[in-house]
Image (cartoon, helix red, strand yellow):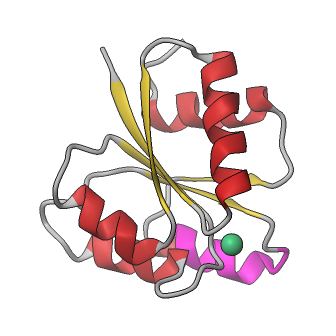
Amino acid sequence: MTFNILIVDDSPVMRSIVRRMLESVHAHGFNCQEAENGQAALDFARSARVDLILTDINMPVMDGEELLRNLETDESLQAIPVIVVSTDKTEGRVQQMMKIGARGYVRKPFMPETLRNEIQRVLGVMR
Ligand SMILES: [Mg+2]
């Protein structure tokens, strides 16, 4: 089974780090796509199947919190699990996103195994 994972971050470097980490811990079974902000992520999710979203918080155009609010109010998208991946040290913003509906949180910087474990916990099905 292939999981379509959408990596949302305004930093191209961070997107490619996350992508390479996912490939290193789980070479098969992940199909990674990237979006540079929340609006691009929303547009993509409305046009293709997305099984999991990994999102940064601070991004131009549309930040991670607004992305999450948009997902949660869209019946066709609200089932997609969201994991927050952020350096944001203000726990308040992460807590707010967990209240809105985020399923998990990984703080940058992180080890590949940390990201993998959080994805496994959220999806509940992978090894
Ligand atoms: Mg950012």
Main SS of residues in magenta: helix
Q: Nearer the viewer, residue 38 or 72?
A: 38
State whether residue 126 is above or below residue 6.
above
Residue 116 at least partly seen: no
Q: Is residue 118 left or right of residue 50?
A: right
Residue 21 image offset from top left, x and y in percent: 70, 30
- Counting the numbered discs, the total is 0
Query: In the image, is residue 51 part of the stretch drawn in magenta?
Result: no
Question: In this picture, which residue range is highlighted in magenta?
Answer: 89-98
Query: In the image, is residue 94 part of the stretch drawn in magenta?
Result: yes
State whether residue 99 is above or below residue 55.
below
Q: Residue at x 69, y 19 (%)?
A: 24
Residue 16 image offset from top left, x and y in percent: 66, 44
Residue 123 image offset from top left, x and y in percent: 44, 33
Q: Residue at x 31, y 78 (%)?
A: 70
Tell me the quarter of the picture where residue 97 sits. bottom right
